[in-house]
Amino acid sequence: MSTHPNTARHYDENAENYHRHVSDPSDGTFHAYYEKPAIRAELPELNGLEVISIGCGSGVDARWLADNGAKRVVGIDISKGLLEIAKSNNPDIEFREMDMEKLDFPDESFDLAYSSLAIHYIDDWTPALEEARRVLRPEGQYIFSCGHPIDSAMEYTTEGKYKYARLGRRVDTETDERIVYGDYLAPTTDGVKPVTGVLKDIEVVVYHRTFAKMIEQILASGFTIERVVEPQPIEGDPKHFEQLTRIPTFMIWVLRKRA
Ligand SMILES: C[S@@+](CC[C@H](N)C(=O)[O-])C[C@H]1O[C@@H](n2cnc3c(N)ncnc32)[C@H](O)[C@@H]1O
């Protein structure tokens, strides 16, 4: 099943806010000090490459890819609102409204597929990965980031003024009674489960999946796995630095098209 319709609605209605958030290092600290440096460090030399930016949002990454040598960058996304911002800020880059599960490009159109924090909106990655593979030239790479399953496995609660995110257990040392927090294995839904968050009054669904499920869906799509990165944050974000040095929120996959 593709991305829930609320996702595009959420990004459309909050397009300016999201663009400000991802562009401003003092606001989008998870991007500026963590995810963006980590995914960019995995990219090959971009000079002369034709690149598709999948789930390009407001075009921040497409701009960076073009400024760092890519010969051609095409951004695709399902949010009209974000695409409008992308187009107006980057008239030299091509942006198109398109679902990553149905890419309207001929086979072997690109050297590199890039995607930042978009694929976790889909429950089964296989159709989207097969499409990315199809539009890549032989030996092309797909480099993408997504939510880390440690993070999406956690149970979120609020107790008084405190918010907790827990994955683990509490054991009563007298009675051995156990309380289990969180759910990594998602046994009733075969390792993939929706995680709903309310963002600016709109319920948005992302999908938790176990590492085993991620690997299964990647290999089923005709890619080999070259690297898996569980990044460390860079210095500069006092609020999340310690947390991110010990508990991951995002991760990076570096894949190569299998012949
Ligand atoms: C967290 S935002 C990231 C945007 C951009 N990559 C960035 O880092 O600024 C996730 C993006 O994925 C897009 N998206 C979600 N599902 C999609 C799909 N099926 N096809 C294309 N884009 C999708 C959303 O519209 C949104 O722009």
Image (tube, rainbow, N blue to C red):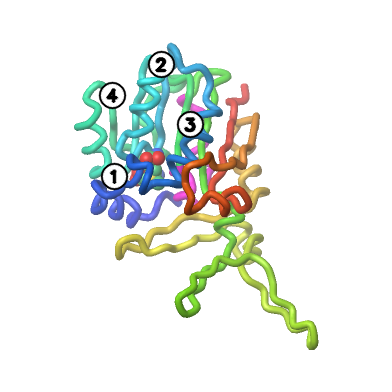
Q: Between disc 1 and disc 4, whose residue precedes?
A: 1
Q: Nearer the viewer, mark 2 or mark 1?
A: 1
91 or 124, nearer to the observer = 91
Which residue shows up at 60% across the image and 31% down it?
222
Q: Secondary structure at mark 2?
A: loop
As helix, strand or loop, the secondary structure at mark 4 comes to: loop
CA–CA distance in space, label 3 to label 1: 28 Å
The C terminus sits in image quarter: top right
The residue positioned 43% from the left and 11% from the top of the image is 48
Circle nearer the N terminus (2, 1): 1
Left/right of residue 238 with respect to residue 220 in the rendered view: left
How far apart, in angstroms, are the residues tagged by discs 3 and 2?
21 Å
**Circle 1 sits on which residue?**
20
Task: Name the secondary structure under disc 1.
Answer: helix
State yes or no: discs 4 and 3 in contact (Cβ < 8 Å). no
Disc 3 marks a residue whose amino acid type is Ala
By secondary structure, the bulk of the magenta-drawn segment is best described as helix
Nearest-to-viewer mark from 4 and 3: 4
Q: Give the residue type that dot 4 points to.
A: Ile
What residue occupies the far top of the structure in this picture?
48
For label 1, count other residues whose C-alpha is less than 10 Å away and answer few (under 14), some (14-19) or many (20+).
Answer: few
Estimate the spatial distance between the alpha carbons at disc 2 and disc 4, rounded to whole Å: 13 Å
The numbered mark, 2 or 4, whose residue comes first in the sequence reads 2
Of badges 3 and 1, the one in the foreground is 1
Residue that label 3 marks? 132
Q: Position of residue 81 (x, y in %)?
A: 23, 44
Measuring from the top left, give residue 85's x and y in whole percent. Answer: 23, 38
Q: Residues within 10 Å of mark 2 (few under 14, many from 20)?
A: some
Circle 4 residue: 93
Q: Which label number is shown at residue 69? A: 2
